[in-house]
Image (cartoon, helix red, strand yellow):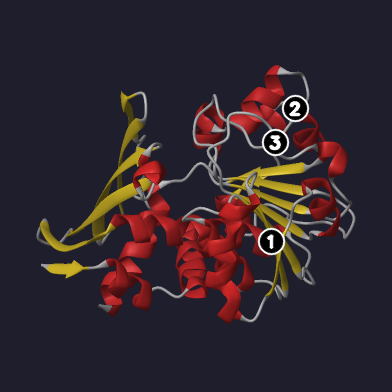
Amino acid sequence: MKIISADQLAEAAPYRDVVEALRQGFRDDIATPPRHHHDTSPVATLLLMPAWSKAFTGLKSVVIKTDNPSLGLPTVIGSYLLIDNRTGAPVAMMDGTELTRRRTAAAGALAADYLARQDSQTLLMVGTGALAPHFIRAHASVRPIKTVLLYNRNPAKAEPLARELAGDGFKIEIAGDLEAAMAKADIISCATTSTTPILRGDWLKPGTHIDLAGAFKPTMRETDGETVARARVYVDTREGAETEAGDLLQAAAEGKFRMENVQGDLFGLCRGKTAGRRNREEITLFKSCGTALEDLAAAVMVYSRS
């Protein structure tokens, strides 16, 4: 059995390649039963995410530990077991944290490939934690991103990410004024654990694409209801959105949105059954809750290259 470390996985999984693996995964026949979701403490959530195709079965275990940053540890820690269906034997155990970060960012970039304007050059990254560099680099793999605006409620916490990105060729700015930053952005990507709105619909400019990935419980949200109300809304999977997409569920509870008005999901977009962006002026929004399909598609690609 192969043991694939985080560094080995990163080398085998450039962002654009993960985007394309996910695109094919949403076109293929991959079974994704409901994931197990357990709050094991006030600050810890256990996720068990199985999936299988004709050739492989995979199981990801993830612990989301919201107090880990104060300990100098990542919020998300996971592992991934890949099984060959011909024999039922495990063929790889890989770092699930790196896999999760890359596939999560790649899912946002995949959606943006259908929903963001082709000439999008300015990306606003809201939240500057461990996921942020992955989202920035994934979006840059599908759109000609030149300027990256970093926003954290504490601007000093954005400085390490600015230094990390310094060699990537972007123009980097730390944004102190979120409203002003939103007025400049073509794509806004959010990866936070917020339970109260950060983005305000009144601050959105026409043509913006919004990529929401941080809030993973119905009680969490990164946007106000007006943001959702102004946008054409897409999701990764409808099942996940209906149970976990706090941004949408809370907007619906406020009378700003109806879940049946979700325009489409990644299955429809990737299979050409759902239209993406229609014009330069509309505001689009993609809400990702995550699906085991993405893990399996990315893991199989990594295994084939390791």
Left or right, 46 with respect to 210, comes to left
- Which secondary structure lies at badge 1? helix
Q: State the separation of the CA atoms marked 1 and 2.
A: 22 Å
Distance between the alpha carbons at the discs numbered 3 and 1:
21 Å
What residue is shown with label 2? 257
Q: Is residue 23 above or below residue 233?
A: below
CB contact under 8 Å: marks 3 and 1: no
> Residue 108, located in which quarter of the rendered image?
bottom right
Question: Does residue 293 appear anywhere in the picture?
Answer: yes
Q: Give the x, y percent position of residue 250.
A: 65, 23
Mark 3 surroundings within 10 Å by alpha-carbon count, few (fewer than 14), some (14 through 19), many (20 or more): many
Question: Residue placed at 62% from the left, 66% from the top?
Answer: 139
Q: Please tell me whether residue 15 is drawn above or below residue 297 in the rendered image.
A: below
Q: Would you name the residue on which mark 1 appears?
A: 114
Quarter of the figure with the C terminus = bottom left
Residue type pointed to by label 1 = Tyr
